[in-house]
Image (cartoon, rainbow, N blue to C red):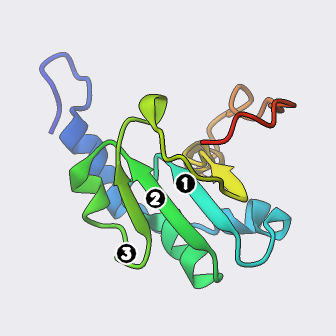
Amino acid sequence: MIAAEGTPTPAAGKTLYRLLPYRGELAIFGRLLPRRSAILELGCGTGRLTEALLDAGHKVTAVDNSPEMLRHVRDDADKVLANIEHLELRRRFDVALLASCLVYKLIGVDTSVQEQPYSSTDDRAGL
């Protein structure tokens, strides 16, 4: 579905993410993950990466702000319906992922802005 001005509607985006196959995103960074990590996946969408993480033996908490998207996430993931800007889970994770930019990387879109490294030395930043 396309909006009058030619802007894709939210429904069109959801359909697109359901149709995208898993394209090996885990191969890009999987070797950096500790075995059997507790992973917080922010913006999980329909769970394409969630599924690969679960199959690799990780425990995944999958967060998205769309109940329609979360319906497609496997039931063995902990699903959280929330906006990531206001997320308060009060527990720690070994890894936090916001990997949606990898979709663009895999299809050849310039992601140089998303690839800028970020680090935090504030150990109190736990979610």
* Residue type, numbered disc 2: Ala
| Residue holding disc 2 | 62
Q: CA distance from mark 1 to mark 2?
A: 5 Å
Neighbours of disc 1 within 10 Å: few (<14), some (14-19), many (20+):
many
Position of residue 92 measured from the top left corner of the image (x, y, whole percent): 65, 53
* Residue type, numbered disc 1: Glu
Quarter of the image containing the N terminus?
top left
Neighbours of disc 3 within 10 Å: few (<14), some (14-19), many (20+):
some
Residue 13 falls in image quadrant: top left
Query: Which residue corresponds to the image point at 51% horizontal and 67% vertical from the top-left?
Result: 50
Quarter of the image containing the C terminus?
top right
Q: Is residue 6 above or below residue 10?
A: above
| Residue holding disc 1 | 41
Name the one closer to the observer, 81 or 109: 81
Side of 45 where 7 appears, left or right:
left
2 or 3: tag closer to the N-terminus: 2
Q: Residue 74 shows which numbered tag?
A: 3
* Residue type, numbered disc 3: Arg
Q: Are marks 1 and 3 in contact (CB under 8 Å)?
A: no
- Label 2: element kind: strand
Position of residue 77 measured from the top left corner of the image (x, y, whole percent): 44, 71
- Label 3: element kind: loop
1 or 2: tag closer to the N-terminus: 1
Name the one closer to the observer, 105 or 88: 88
Q: CA distance from mark 2 to mark 3?
A: 10 Å
Q: Are marks 1 and 2 in contact (CB under 8 Å)?
A: yes
Q: Is residue 21 above or below residue 9?
A: below
Position of residue 15 measured from the top left corner of the image (x, y, whole percent): 25, 53
Side of 16 where 119 appears, left or right:
right
Residue 125 falls in image quadrant: top right
Side of 74 where 9 appears, left or right:
left
